[in-house]
Image (tube, rainbow, N blue to C red):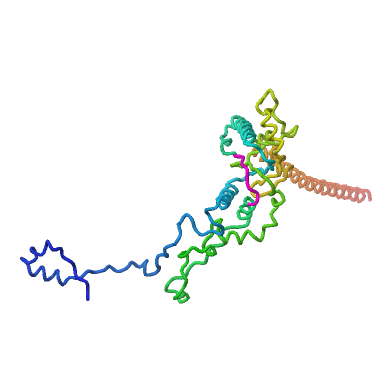
Amino acid sequence: MTPRLRICPQCHHLLKAKPTLYRYLSTASAITPAAPPSQLNSSPPPIARYPRTQPPSHKAPEFRKSQLHRQYTSLLRSTPLLLLFQHNNLKAKEWMSIRRELQFALEKVDNDLSTNLAPAIKIQAIQASIFQSALLVVEYYHPEQHRTARQPHPTDPSTQSSASLANDTPNAADPTLTHYLSRTAHSAAFPHKKNHPLRPLLSGPLATISFPTVTPQHVRAALSILAPKAPTFPAPTRRVNPGYHETSVQQGLQKLMLLGARVEGRVFDNEGIRWMGGIEGGMEGLRGQLVRILGEVGAGMTGALEGMGRSLWVTVEGRRGMLEEEEEKKGRSGGES
């Protein structure tokens, strides 16, 4: 039986005066509109039983280790240049003094280059084991390669009538979860645990300096403060920067040791990072050197090709001169006879 329309009690006395209208209303039925074609072809996804901003993870996300893993993953993905240092239990005052002198040197480079990179260059202590796990995930896990297959159309005969619905229960092993704390990311990075080139350096107390872009001038300034080495990376003199020679700064620097760097996904050792920091003119100077080298190679190749053509021309001209002389000799001998 079709449902009837309900009439409020206050309207009954008005409908009694018009029995015909009352009869039409009493026989009227509620009509439910048809579903749109989009709902006929696909059903809405099931309601997830976990917050959208906190999907199931391989490790519990409320732990500090998981949050550090997220922080290090974001740092490695957004930082093209990362210097790696080993520190030996620096005190808070020593950290503060080193950060002050480093910021002072970087701001001086910003003033010379008319840039504003010093506020984005940070030095921080890290936990080696968690940083290594985040590094493996960033290097060897690519979410676009672990997407689940597209679901078939409901009218496709290959569609299963009793297919299981995804994202309805919090399951860390769900293959549709592709964030960097998921089981899928952990499984992709685990086989490479002992193969990464930075693995021998990721032990003990570590600290990193992150740069938002590859800039040899700022690297030179940072190395001159944290790991000075004359003559390319001399430490500031007492007259130029008296604060650098304070006891807290010098004691802290004695506990720092440069290990290497990660530059755009490549691993640099101590000498390699000093070579990059010693490039004259920064990236523009490196591009100029590359253009000059390519120009010299092109000039050498042009000279070699021209030399080959010139030698061929000389050979042909010499042969032609010999033939002309032989013809003249034959003509003279014929005239004398």
Q: Position of residue 223 (x, y in %)?
A: 68, 36
64 or 102, which is in the foreground?
A: 64
- Left or right: 180 with respect to 12? right
Kindly indicate the quadrant of the structure image that contains residue 247: top right
Which region of the structure is painted magenta? 122-129
Q: Residue at x 61, y 32 (%)?
A: 100
**In percent of the image, x 48 and y 75: which residue is there?**
158
Dominant secondary structure, magenta: strand
Which residue is pictured at 47% across the width and 66% down the height?
166
Magenta run includes residue 258:
no
- Give how far across and how far down residue 313 sits, in percent: 80, 47
Q: Is residue 272 above or below residue 224?
A: below
Quadrant location of the N terminus? bottom left
Does 232 appear above or below 140? above
- In the image, residue 124 lies in the stretch drawn in magenta: yes
Residue 243 place in picture, x, y as percent: 65, 27
Q: What x and y, as percent, mark residue 191? A: 66, 61
